[in-house]
Image (spheres, grey):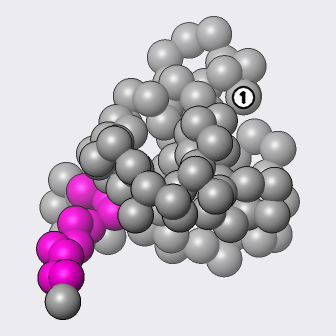
Amino acid sequence: TIHAQWEPLFVWSDATEAGRILECRLPTPKGLRTISESEVAAHWRQIAGNSGEPKFSDFWAGLDESRVQQWSHQAAAEHRTAFVAVMWLIQHGLIGDDNMPSKEAIASN
C-alpha cells in the first residue's frame, strides 16, 4: 500500500477571507512545481495589457462580469491562480487537449 502525503494546492497568506494566495503547488512527474503570486500577477498583467504595476483587477479583463460577481474573494483568487497553473500544465504536456492528464503524466505515476 502506498500512502501519499497530500500538499495543499494553494498556500494562503492567512486563513481569512481577506487573505491572498502566495503560491500554488502542482504535482508533476518531476516533483512539486510552485507557481508564485508574482508569476500569476505577471500573466494577468499581460492579458489585461497593463503596462504598469500588476493589479488584482487585471484578472477581471475579458471575463464574464455576471459570473465573476457571484464569486467570493477566495473563489476569485482560486480561479485566478488555477487558470495560470492549468496553462502551465498544458504548456508542459501534462494536460492533454481533452483537459485530462496526458499519457506522459499518467505514465510517470
**Is residue 29 a member of the stretch shown in magenta?**
no
Q: Which residue is mark 1?
A: 47
Q: Nearer the viewer, residue 25 or 3?
A: 3
| Side of 46 where 25 appears, left or right | left
In the displayed structure, 16 sits above or below 28; it is: below
- Which residue is painted at 81% across and 55% down in the image? 97
Q: Residue furthest bottom?
A: 1
Quadrant placement of the N terminus: bottom left
| Side of 98 where 3 appears, left or right | left
Callout 1 environment at 10 Å: few (<14), some (14 to 19), or many (20+)? some
- Which residue is painted at 56% across and 12% down in the image? 52
Q: Which residues are magenta?
A: 2-11
| Side of 64 where 82 appears, left or right | left
**Is residue 4 a member of the stretch shown in magenta?**
yes
In the displayed structure, 90 sits above or below 99; it is: above
Q: Position of residue 15 (x, y in %)?
A: 19, 70
Q: Position of residue 94 (x, y in %)?
A: 58, 49
- Which residue is painted at 44% across and 56% down in the image? 108
